[in-house]
Image (tube, grey):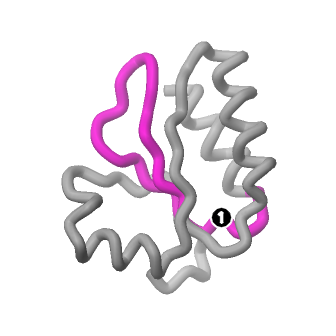
Amino acid sequence: RSALDEFVKVCRTIDGVDLILLHGKETPEKATLLILGKLVDVEKVHRCVMDIKSKYNYTILQLMLEPEQFEQMTQMGLYQGKKVVLYRRQNMNT
């Protein structure tokens, strides 16, 4: 799990990232993450994904959404199933 831990540790320092959710089940080879925030530095997140792939041979499938988009899509039933909070910015209301 160190690959995922390192990803979260780096991403929590990226401007705009408010919430990181593990969506579904993590496997030894990959994890699917939902990254919520406004004005997230997409290039830094992509760089982090590539660094983790290179260092650990671990695939992170990620989708970045604004909180409102995530709420609407959840209400539409698009993100059903298990979700685990890996990181939540302290001053975040959601």
The location of residue 41, given as percent across then percent down, is 77, 59
Name the residue tied to disc 1. Answer: 17
Q: Residue at x 40, y 18 (%)?
A: 28
Q: Evaluate whether residue 68 shows in this view.
A: yes
The location of residue 38, given as percent across then percent down, is 66, 75
Q: Note whether 42 is above or below 59 in the view shown.
A: below
Q: Note whether 32 is above or below 79 in the view shown.
A: above
Q: Residue at x 57, y 37 (%)?
A: 5
Query: Which amino acid, by three-letter code, is at mark 1?
Result: Val
Left or right of residue 81, residue 38 in this image: right
Left or right of residue 59, residue 51 in this image: right
Quarter of the image where one finds residue 18 = bottom right
Q: Verify whether residue 93 appears in magenta.
A: no
Find the magenta span and give its range: 13-35
The location of residue 27, given as percent across then percent down, is 36, 24
- Which quarter of the figure is the C terminus placed in? bottom left
Q: Give 10 or 23, whichever is nearer the viewer.
A: 23
The 10 Å Cα crowd at callout 1, few under 14, some 14 to 19, many 20 or more, is many
Q: Note whether 85 is above or below 37 in the view shown.
A: above
